[in-house]
Image (cartoon, grey):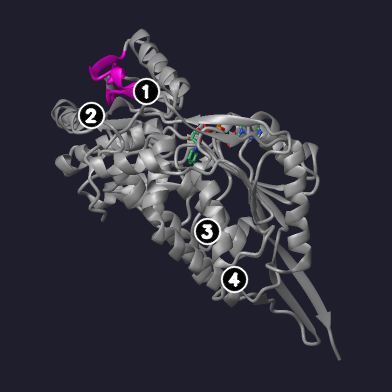
Amino acid sequence: MTELTFADWQARASEIEIEGRAFINGQYTDALSGETRPTYNPATGEKLVDVASCGPEDADLAVKYARDAFESGVWADMAPSERKMVLVRWAELIELYAEELALLETLDVGKPISDTFNIDAPSAARTIRWSGEAIDKVYEQIAPTPAGTMGLITRLPLGVVAAIVPWNFPLSTTAWKIAPSLATGNSVIVKPASNTPLTAIRIAELASEAGLPDGVLQILPGPGGSLGQHLSTHMDIDGLTFTGSTPVGKMLMEYSGQSNLKRTFLELGGKSPNIVFADADLDKAANMAAMAVFFNGGQTCTAGTRLIVQDSVHDEFMAKVIECAKGWAPGNPLDPETVMGPMVDQGQYNTVAEYVEVGLGEGAELAYGGKRVLSDEGGYYHEPTIFTGVNNQMRIAQEEIFGPVMSVIKFSDAQEAVEIANDSIFGLAGAVWSRDINTAIKVAEKVRVGTMGVNNYFGGDITVPFGGFKQSGNGRDKSIHAFDDYTELKTTWIEFE
Ligand code: NAD
């Protein structure tokens, strides 16, 4: 827990030196074209720094270094226990520089400093340490084959992996990708979101300091359309791991088919159901229902944006949720008391504002919020917003808004709750609240999502896999299962006399 005050963080923000160059072959470097793109502080709209805007020629160079590093075996052939030591040292450095990383993330994304310091930075360190610690404890298999034969089943690194990540949790999502891919021996190229590249750029230097060989990790800031597409269609990249929107994820599957069938794993959008039965602990459920949507300003793939409430307690419960929503008033993200910051940029703010209009147009009832606030600060602040009287066919119940907007839908019995929950193209996360363990488990089993909470929301840690059903994706981040996405399964059949 940091003791730093709002004034301390503001002072540090005014002094911080920000690196905006790409990181290729162990060095910071400008884009070959010399082009840059500014990144802005969402809390003020002010420019932070000009960032290298890498293009296909930079990608080709990074791939060449990554391939050379992989083929040389400098990392891939290192004993797992040695790779572990490097990753653990890296995690320690991330912890050492947690204040700086948290500040960078807050300035770049607008996330509250109390979140970036207490959640994002420690979670990145824990993910990297956990993958490092795990990798020398994973055993291979020998198949049950006839005498005179031996079937070895082993896992080998894919080779060169590209990771394309979004702007909502830049540091922790990057860690979710690079920790298992590096632990399993791959060389990795990260393309951060073009509006939030700063922490990825910084931790690459810490990786080098920890002993990661040159060329094994490269960070290429740049636009999705050109740079991202070039990486996704590259013939010398073996694996692609992506977190982002469903439409872009669909394109990446096509790019894979059009190029070299690179292994492509996707973590995509969501419209997650949060189901509250009348017999739940309503105070706790209301508190968490607000958090499930308003945490990170609703810019969370797993946000519980469809609150599905049993009709007999709807009014009583919603009065509690609205009380809780008042605690999520937006504020300056450098203030340690702030729980919700601005939207990441003007475009995202506009999307949220448009969906509020859509909800009103569809006949939903605006029960709380709905407006821009703090506009004199120059940032993109939107109130926590609650629509009641929503039916599941409305656009505000079906489409991912990615902002602090809750859509509340009534149900009468468990079967109807499950039907509403599953009536979605997405299947990322969800939760059910009930004191009856039979109801809770029955519903949890039937809801088709990758992560389901029972009497909690946002539960889970690095030990359990994370990913989506349906159009929420096909890969799994976190836990030992993440290693599968970055390795090929190989059989070696041996015959002997
Ligand atoms: P996005 O899809 O617009 O961008 C994600 C990344 O893809 C960025 O780095 C972007 O530059 C790049 N990109 C864009 N077009 C590309 C193209 N044609 N080829 C290759 N790369 C391209 O998503 P976003 O707006 O940055 O992030 C929000 C989305 O991410 C939401 O849909 C959210 O649900 C999703 N998300 C999912 C998870 C998860 O784990 N399931 C986690 C966080 C965010």
Question: Which of the 4 image quarters holds residue 449?
Answer: top left
| Cα separation between marks 1 and 2 | 13 Å
| Cα separation between marks 4 and 2 | 44 Å
Range of residues picked out in magenta: 364-385
| Pointer 1 or 4: first along the chain | 4
Kind of residue at disc 4: Arg
Determine whether, in the image, residue 316 is placed left or right of residue 200.
left
Q: Position of residue 118 (x, y in %)?
A: 32, 51
| Cα separation between marks 2 and 3 | 35 Å
Going 20% across and 39% down the picture, which residue do you hit?
287
Within 8 Å of ligand 1, the CB of disc 1? Answer: no
| Cα separation between marks 4 and 3 | 15 Å
Going 63% across and 32% down the picture, which residue do you hit?
224
**Which residue corresponds to mark 1?**
380
What is the crowding at mark 1: few (fewer than 14 residues within 10 Å), some, or many (at least 20)?
many
- Residue 206, label in figure: 3
What is the crowding at mark 2: few (fewer than 14 residues within 10 Å), some, or many (at least 20)?
some
| Pointer 4 or 2: first along the chain | 4
Give the label, 2 or 3, closer to the camera. Answer: 3
Above or below, 78 against 176 in this view is: below
**Which residue corresponds to mark 2?**
329
